[in-house]
Image (cartoon, grey):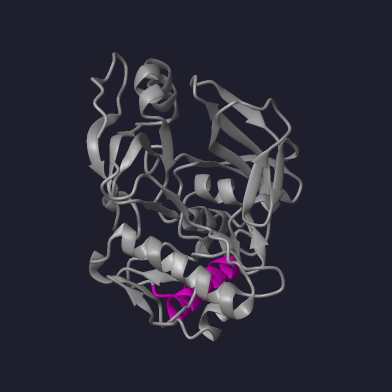
Amino acid sequence: MIQVNATLGAGLRGELRRDVPMARHCTWRAGGCAAYAYRPADLEDLSLFLRSHAELLRVAPPLFVGLGSNLLVRDGGLRATAILLHPGLGGLRLGAVEGERVQVLAQAGVAAPKLARFAANHGLVQAEFLAGIPGTVGGALCMNAGCYGSETWQYVRAVQTMERTGAIQVREPADFAIAYRHVRAHGFALGIEAWFVAAVFEFPRGDGAEARARIKDLLARRVASQPLDQPNAGSVFRNPPGDFAARLIESCGLKGFAIGGARVSEKHANFIVNPGGRGSATDIERLIEYVQVVVEQQRRVRLQTEVRIVGESAGES
């Protein structure tokens, strides 16, 4: 790992650690170490950390991590500073009311299912789909996460982004190119490195009891159809236009196929599980690549990953 002499400066209230095993912070329970990890106390603390540790972050750039449910860190580790947003950036409250629509302000470290329950408990509807997203608001914003026919950015009215300097900016959906599982900045200057730290959502008023019942039903459907009892990172591949990744993988006879400790789930073919955390990040990545090759050979479709893979392979750190 790289060597940087880093200490917390005056005023910082978070926790900075060196050589942090990312398997503890990724839902696959696999992967190497991050050179550093910082867990901010809150949004202001994160801003101060970015401002006061520019030299550290020049050598070990920031990687923002929520629940680690869409992330694989290779076994050789990561020459970065993992910024662990959960639970420090956990602010969640009601905002402005505009007729029959109510705004909800949520910071990036809020778990998406928590946002769904919060909305339902305040008599708001259409947020129920968020209960099926196994990550945080920040991750949902980054990839326009969605399920059950809805997507995150349908309900976003504004976002807060934080630049590497610690500056916070308010931006609108028009500042971004938003597509299926993809969000790209296009309405402000290129070359600005910034991360989502909060969002303003807007949901209509409705029957909160019905919303809570729908959340309960959606969670029951997840338990019945997804391998939630084993370490996984949610859906591994994006659905290709007009089809489903799970159907293509299953049609190639890959359910249950394993490389090392990693295995294509028998319950849902678009999930790769790591039973007991015994598989390595290398096992998982090799299995992802194998599935892509087989599906392309047999079905003439190149599956694109939803999960983000970062870091160095074993022996390269």
As drawn, is 129 to the left or to the right of 22? right
Quarter of the figure that contains the N terminus: top left
Magenta region includes residue 29: no
- Residue 32, given in percent of the width and then of the height, sits at 27, 48
Predominant SS of the magenta segment: helix
Instruction: Tell me if I can see residue 162 in this picture.
Output: yes
- Horizontally, residue 177 falls left or right of residue 281, namely right
Whether residue 203 is visible = no
From this view, report whether residue 256 is shown above or below residue 242: below
Can you say whether 11 is above or below 290 in the image?
Answer: above
Q: Quadrant of the C terminus?
A: top left
Q: Position of residue 270 (x, y in %)?
A: 49, 72
User: Viewer-proximal residue, 5 or 42?
Assistant: 5
Quadrant housing residue 237: bottom right
Between 266 and 214, which is closer to the camera in this rendering? Answer: 266
Q: Residue at x 63, y 71 (%)?
A: 301
Q: Which residue occupies 46% across, 65% down?
A: 289
Q: Is residue 226 magenta?
A: yes
Front in this rendered view, residue 239 or 161: 239
Residue 267 in the image: above or below residue 158: below
Q: Report x, y in % for residue 245.
A: 58, 73
- Could you tell me how many numbered marks the image carries? 0
Nearest the viewer among 161 and 194 is 194
Q: Residue at x 51, y 44 (%)?
A: 138
304 lies above or below 76 = below
Please, which residue is most extreme toward the top here? Answer: 10
What is the magenta range? 209-227
